[in-house]
Image (cartoon, helix red, strand yellow):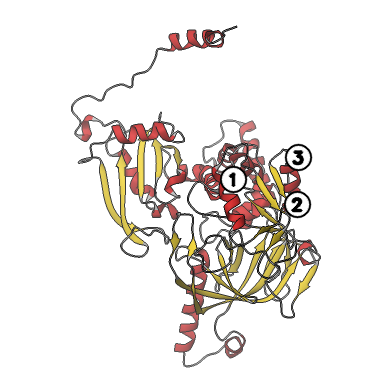
Amino acid sequence: MQFNNLREFITWLEHHDQLVRITVPVAAELEITEIVDRVSKGSSERNKALLFEKVTHHEMPHENGTPVLMNMFGSAQRMAWALHVDQLDDLIHNLAKVIDLRPPQNLGAAVGRGMELFNALRAVGLKPRKVKHAPVQEVIETHAPSLDFLPILTCWPQDGGPFITLPQVITRHPETGTRNVGMYRLQKLDSRRLLVHWQRHKGGAEHARVAQAREGRRKEEDNITNHESRITNPKSLIPAAVVLGGDPACIWSASAPLPPDIDEYLLAGWLRGRPVEFVDCITQPLSVPAEAEIVIEGYVDPNEQHLEGPFGDHTGYYTPIEPFPVFHITAITRRRAPLYPATVVGVPPMEDYWMGKATERLFLPLLRLFLPEVVDFAMPAPGVFHNLVLVSIKKRFPGHARKVIHGLWGLALLSLAKNIIVVDEWVDVQNFTEAAWQALGNVDWSRDIMISNGPVDHLDHASYQHSFGGKIGIDATAKLPEEGYARGWPEVARMSPEVKARIDNLWANLFNTA
């Protein structure tokens, strides 16, 4: 399966009975959220993508407006299709083949490995693919561009205003030029301004810090040799673009926790099996996916801040009002009849859980590069990603679980995990009942826990200090004598294979009452 844009994905979902068209007029203020929330938490039969075809909002109270696509990533199957695979676990196998560091055993294996690497390089593209004419630039507005035509959602009653919730926010590093694509919510201030909620641990926030530092250095220099650049960019403004729509793999990739210098659209190209096509922006020195629905061009002034929020977030709580930088709009380009993709977050489970599940599956092979003893890991929905990580390992020596906990706290955004529970390799961490059984029954709470302080998620409201708080690691593995356990660890009560096989053969007839 291959999708170039949202329209092709919608066609695929509709063909597979995974999309419902809502033709009743619904308001972008609160009503769409209530519908999506019920669908996300309802039965699997009702949990489908929703295309709202008649959406009203404050600026267009009597018009059908722009259709709104919701919940397209809201199940394991739809999330897998969005990333061009049949099942999410296919992501593990596909990436593992590319990054396999073991030497090939024979010529055939070497050729196969070479082809995997070649195909991966071809997919991401050594150079960006540029086009001169793009669907997203069928309509170009540079004279007084306005956000008012967009059905931007007001999700929850106490939200500070309408928020764009499923964007791809593009910036480039002010010094290296490396592109960053982030999924940062954007609060609408008025028809020409947005607020960019890039949290302190995100790539966009780092671009802002670098821009501010550069400006500070310029002010301190007595002899400025590059006088022209100071005039043309006196405040170190950050060119930016907000992309809505495109290939669903591009949309999801904006949420992927990649290292700072890796372009998220390269990941999207690998997932697609071919490079992303770009078109140059009209008013900013950036390029954007050509197959997008809408692009909002502009710039961010890191020195101009405005109070943002509250916002009903994925933690299930409103995040407080904080200052964030202003995005000034210089142009809006779009298709003639665009679609508006959005998502709703709140009390779990919701669509963002499946977006996180895709991240979990894709990054397992990369995690094993650093911690090869890891069998699997999972982030249950109630943990809202950062509150709980379950890990199974092949335990080989005393203190092995503690080694893994320390290792995870040193890896990228897993450094923000507040609770890491390590279990033995036979425990299925995707089966939360089985994992809880082990975590609760295998722990001596006076000996098997590690309590530390460190960085926590920007949105964590329980920490007494902003973005810094307590963390716990729990060793729920079977304990070894060298770890001070002298009683002899008991065996799990399991049925013999012979009896299981006999009952398997009898099972179909046991409950046949005919």
User: How far apart are the alpha carbons under marks 2 and 3?
Assistant: 12 Å
- For this view, does 496 lie left or right of residue 53? left
Is label 2 in a helix, a strand or a loop?
A: helix
- Residue 15, numbered label: 3
Amino acid type, mark 2: Arg
Relative to residue 337, is residue 414 depicted above or below?
Answer: above
Measuring from the top left, give residue 461's x and y in whole percent: 37, 60
- For this view, does 177 lie left or right of residue 476? right
Judging by the rendered image, the residue that carries numbered circle 1 is 39
Measuring from the top left, give residue 307's x and y in whole percent: 48, 75
Question: Residue at (52%, 62%) from the top-left corner?
Answer: 157
Question: Residue at (61%, 61%) from the top-left corner?
Answer: 167
Amino acid type, mark 3: His
Dot placed on the residue nearer the N-terminal end, 2 or 3: 2
Is disc 3 surrounded by few (<14), some (14 to 19) or many (20+) residues within 10 Å? few
- Residue 24, numbered label: none
